[in-house]
Image (cartoon, rainbow, N blue to C red):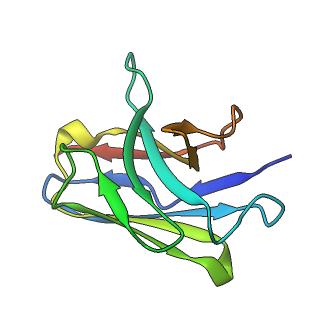
Amino acid sequence: QVQFVESGGGLVQPGGALRLSCRVSRTIFAPVSTMAWYRQAPGNQRQLVASITGGGNSNYADSVKGRFTISRDNAKNTVYLQMNSLIPEDTAAYYCNILFNGGPFFNSWGQGTQVTVSS
């Protein structure tokens, strides 16, 4: 059962922008849940990039602070990640999940969306 469907990735030049979307299955989405974006580059562990609580409070990894913005639309059970001023180090597959006790709630992940930043 697909629970997370990520989209919006692509190839972009350094300094460019992308907006990622994650549609969450209605069977698991709750407006009170903290949602999060993660990313994984080849050879690296999956890394927490940003999170947003049900009340709209957000947190970011230091590496993306000031460049990325997470948001959510509870009516559409969708979470977004606006990425500006992209750099090659942002190249990774991006995934979303529910954040619980500091980690991903679900062990199963969506297919992710690939972001490649290159000139």
**Residue 101 pos. (x, y %):** 54, 39
Q: In the rendered image of this protein, does residue 96 appear above or below residue 107?
A: below
Q: In the rendered image of this protein, does residue 66 appear above or below residue 45?
A: below
- Residue found farthest to the bottom: 75
Q: Quadrant of residue 42?
A: top left
Instruction: State the residue at coordinates (22%, 64%).
Output: 84
Instruction: State the residue at coordinates (42%, 39%).
Output: 39
**Residue 13 pos. (x, y %):** 19, 54
Does 7 sit left or right of 109 as displayed?
Answer: left
Does 7 sit left or right of 76 as displayed?
Answer: left
Badge count:
0
92 or 24, which lies in front?
A: 24
Instruction: State the residue at coordinates (21%, 43%).
Output: 118
Instruction: State the residue at coordinates (66%, 55%).
Output: 5
Does 61 sit left or right of 10 as displayed?
Answer: left
Does 6 sit left or right of 37 as displayed?
Answer: right
**Residue 8 pos. (x, y %):** 48, 61
114 or 119, which lies in front?
A: 114
**Residue 47 pos. (x, y %):** 39, 33
